[in-house]
Image (spheres, helix red, strand yellow):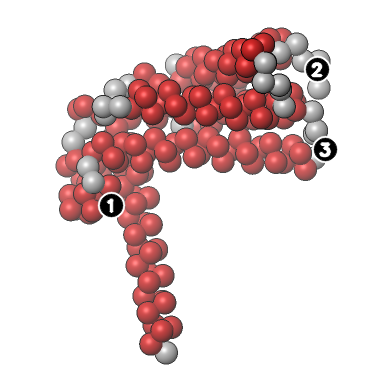
Amino acid sequence: MRASGQSQGSAWQWSRTADTRRTLIAAAGEVFAQRGFAECSVADVVERAGLSVGSLYHHYGGKSELFLAVWEDHQAAYEEQAATAVALARRDGTTSPAELFLVGARAYLETTWERRALARLFLDGDGPPGFFLVRSRRRNDWVRQNAVLLAVGTGPADRLLVSILTAAMGEAGRQIIGCETEDQAVAVTESALAIIRRLSDLPEG
């Protein structure tokens, strides 16, 4: 019985910790998006979260670490949406790597509109020291993931094609975060997908 009680207590503590982290990330995302990294203070975040300063430092160590946690959560949302869309397309019978890439690209662009405030912050806003390098490394990872999805070779022309397509997606994302309405964002998305198809010389699916 004691072991069971300890297990239940541990589960409760883990759940409480996870809830606190989610609350801090959500609050920090809102404050960073509104004020930027430099102008945002720890006090701003904990006031929005309804938690204590000590709680923030306990879970994340400081403002820079929290910013990076928000960034990782943001990236995870992109990856989850794209992976889900591609998996559903495969389930429905899509096997062409090129068509699966376009499915993933659409998911990326739609997620950019849904998360446009944070997307704007991470694309054009400020960040803690070293964030530019973190962002560059993630882009390189993104290129590699796209190469796998497209099932291309490893030659210079293949690498260049994937880099160009990835850059096109990124630029379309920049255009989307500047849209004022969802209709405008949809128009940019459709135009971007048509351009990506032409760049990669893919037939219509």
| Residue drawn at the location 64% of the way across and 25% of the way down | 147
Q: Residue under circle 3?
A: 93
| Residue drawn at the location 44% of the way across and 36% of the way down | 74
Q: Position of residue 85 (x, y in %)?
A: 66, 37
Which corner quadrant holds the N terminus? Answer: bottom left
Nearest to the eye among marks 1 and 3: give it: 1
Dot 2 and dot 3 residues touching (CB under 8 Å): no
Q: Position of residue 30 (x, y in %)?
A: 33, 36
Distance (Cα) linking label 1 and label 3: 44 Å
Q: Residue under circle 2?
A: 204
Mark 2 or mark 1, which has the lower sequence index? 1
Check disc 1 and give the amino acid type.
His
Mark 2 or mark 3, which has the lower sequence index? 3
Residue furthest out toward the bottom: 1
Q: Is residue 36 above or below residue 80?
A: above
User: Quarter-wise, where is residue 39 in the image?
Assistant: top left
Q: Residue under circle 1?
A: 59
Distance (Cα) linking label 2 and label 1: 49 Å
Q: Position of residue 51 (x, y in %)?
A: 23, 53
Q: Position of residue 93 (x, y in %)?
A: 82, 38
Q: Label 2: few (<14), some or many (≥20) within 10 Å?
A: few
Image check: 106 left or right of 117? Answer: right
Which corner quadrant holds the C terminus? Answer: top right
